[in-house]
Image (cartoon, helix red, strand yellow):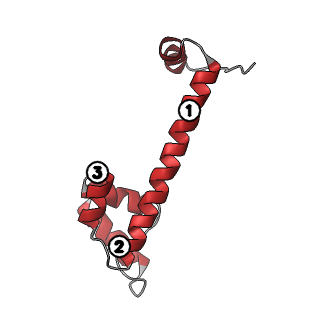
């Protein structure tokens, strides 16, 4: 049987109340959360590839991800993604991102 050891009181409370201390249910939910996050990252990267090809605007991407442009810019900064074509320097892109954050 799977056993889950938790050392955080807040997290343990959630485990007990929302998952009835059921490790299988808890682990399955956690796996789904990680898979969902990975799929979201893949979708973001796919949409940004379309942006680089001038097929989508940043506004379109934000709308498709159901987030505002500011959050989209933070995600781009997190993944070190450029705003403009490769002919521009990354440093300039980072300045542009910071300007809008």
Q: Are marks 3 and 2 in contact (CB under 8 Å)?
A: no
The image shows residue 96 at horizontal and vertical percentages of 29, 71
Between 76 and 34, which is closer to the camera in this rendering? 34
Q: CA distance from mark 3 to mark 1?
A: 23 Å
Residue found 54% across the figure and 30% down from its top: 29
Within the image, what quadrant is residue 55 found in? bottom left
In the rendered structure, which disc, 3 or 2, sits on the residue that comes first in sequence? 2
* Residue 48 placement: quadrant: bottom left
Query: Rounded to the nearest whole Å, what is the CA distance between mark 3 and mark 2?
Result: 16 Å
Q: Secondary structure at mark 2?
A: helix
Q: Quadrant of residue 23?
A: top right
Query: Who comes first in sequence, dot 3 or dot 1?
Result: 1
**Is residue 10 visible to the viewer in this orientation of the structure?**
yes
Residue 95 or residue 5, whichever sits in front: 5
Please name the residue that numbered disc 1 is placed on: 30
Considering only vertical position in the picture, is 75 above or below 5? Answer: below
| Vertical arrangement, residue 89 with respect to residue 39, above or below | below
Residue at point 30%, 56% (across, down):
64
> How many residues crowd mark 1 within 10 Å: few (<14), some (14–19), many (20+)?
few
Which residue is depicted at the point 31% across and 62% down? 61
Nearer-the-camera pick, 86 or 15 = 15
> Which residue is identified by label 2?
51
Q: Of helix, strand and loop, which one carries label 1?
A: helix
Residue at image mark 3: 67
Asked if residue 95 lies left or right of residue 13, the reply is left
Q: Position of residue 77 (x, y in %)?
A: 40, 62
CB under 8 Å between callouts 2 and 1? no
Residue 6 image offset from top left, x and y in percent: 62, 20
Q: Give the secondary structure at mark 3.
A: loop
Q: Say left or right for 19 vs 90.
A: right
Q: Residues within 10 Å of mark 2 (few under 14, many from 20)?
A: some
């Amino acid at each position: 049987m799977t056993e889950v050891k938790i050392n955080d009181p807040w997290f343990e409370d959630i485990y007990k109340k929302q998952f009835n201390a059921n490790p299988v249910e808890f682990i399955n939910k956690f796996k789904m959360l990680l898979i969902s996050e990975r799929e979201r990252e893949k979708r973001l990267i796919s949409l940004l590839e379309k942006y680089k090809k001038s097929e989508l605007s940043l506004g379109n991407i934000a709308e498709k991800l159901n987030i505002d442009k500011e959050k989209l810019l933070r995600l781009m900064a997190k993944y070190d993604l450029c705003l403009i074509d490769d002919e521009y320097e990354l440093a300039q892109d980072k300045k542009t991102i910071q300007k809008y954050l």
